[in-house]
Image (cartoon, rainbow, N blue to C red):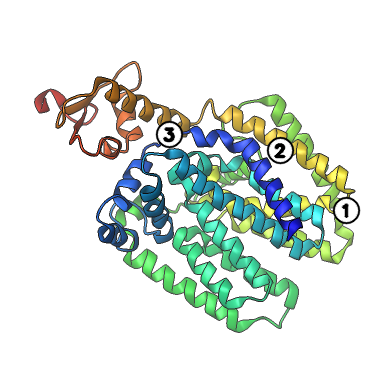
Amino acid sequence: MKKEFLVFLILLFFIFFVYQPAFLNFFAQDDFILINQFSQNNIWQDLKNVFGPPQVTHWRPIHNLYFFVAGNLFSENYAGYHALTFAFHIGASFLIYKTAFRLFKNQVASLSSGILYGVHPAHFISLFWISGGATSIGFFFLIASFYGYLTGKRSFSLILFLLAILASEAMMVGLGIILLWEILTKGKKLDKRFLVEIGVISTVFAVVRFLTFTPKTAFDVYNLEFSTLIISTVKYYLLRIAGFAEVSGDKIISIFLLSWLVLISLLLIKTLSKKQDIRLLILSVAVITIGLFPFILIPSHLSPHYMNLSIFGFSTLVSCALKQLKPLTSFTIILIFVVISASNINQTLNNNWVIRRGNFAKAYIEQIEKDNPASGATLTFEDSSLSTSREAYISLGTGKGIKFWFKDRNYKTCFSAFEKCAILN
């Protein structure tokens, strides 16, 4: 117990070290919409919105429940929302450590897996954007389900798997990981009952989610494409999984990361002589591959934060390479990746749309607080030195940010990019 608590503190330290700026990021765009929809209304209406047919977002009851809980607990305290997301993220990192220890039986390699996942720069959107946490929450329950499966707690695993897909439908691909591990470890003696049960859960969920609770407009927006664009999409995601930041543009850091990856590759070659290691390598590569879906088929919506599952595969793959080394050497190699990740995250802070739109929303709200318009006034957002009217519309969640922040002022909004504001005023 003391050892596990120490591991938890180590993970907490490293994750906070690289991602602590996220606590300072303001609400942005969808945050306002989802908080308004799922919290601070009549409690029964909120719960109906959480679990009922979708009105403003996807049908993801567990992710919606996050906004119900956080919205009522923290209201306008955005740091509280980030803290709750961090709790899921740190929890997932700790469960990766626990899962990796079941697989590797090696303390250093297992801890390395947890650290690598926790500090990976691809989590930027998930941790800096409050609305971006669906896959993080879903993955937390998925890795908990996989750990429950590995420890023989089948019923518990099924419940957690259901929670995972209710948080993010993308977690359905986790079924493939369990099936693969069954084949790798049991051959023909599969746990058919468990596989049938988890398959039934997935099928029923898919019918309800996609045939009942997904409007046609959602299919149009997230249209699956089978074209040559898949090649560039795969390249994009593989670079993100490997740790290259999306927009940092720092060539020196990229060279260091490339050198680090070459070292890991050379170490992996040495593991090919052991049957047990080959099985773990197959699992790791398969998890990376499975985690690419369905996102490589949606090239119009690229984002690194979808890659939670693949990053888990990446972290176990690296740990396969490190477990043959002395603890101090392994830890040094992990520290290098931590520094690279921290650098990439700091570079991304200067270029990412989440930061920019959070800053826009905060600036507009602070200006309104300073001007203090009369209750019921119409607030006009035109192109200005701060942002365009269109950016204001997006950053403020189509105007829901004003309703959320100034609940009792009954302000109306007009965005000149879409309306003739002079007439309204």
Sequence-earlier tag: 1 or 2: 1
Q: Position of residue 7 (x, y in %)?
A: 72, 52
| Quadrant where the N terminus is found in the figure | bottom right
Q: Residues within 10 Å of mark 3 (few under 14, many from 20)?
A: many
Q: Hey, what amino acid is under mark 3? A: Phe
Of 265 and 407, the residue lying toward us: 407
Q: Residue at x 68, y 25 (%)?
A: 251
Q: Position of residue 207 (x, y in %)?
A: 39, 70
Please tell me the numbered disc located at residue 26: 3
Sequence-earlier tag: 2 or 3: 3
User: Is 192 on the left-hand or right-hand side of 271?
Assistant: left
State whether residue 30 is above or below residue 159: above
Of circles 1 and 2, the one toward us is: 2
| Quadrant where the C terminus is found in the figure | top left
For label 1, the residue is 324
Q: Hey, what amino acid is under mark 1? A: Gln
For label 2, the residue is 338
**Distance CA(mark 3)–CA(mark 1):** 44 Å
Which residue ends up furthest to the top in the rendered image? 385
Of circles 2 and 3, the one toward us is: 3
Q: Position of residue 152 (x, y in %)?
A: 67, 76
Identify the element where label 1 is drawn: loop
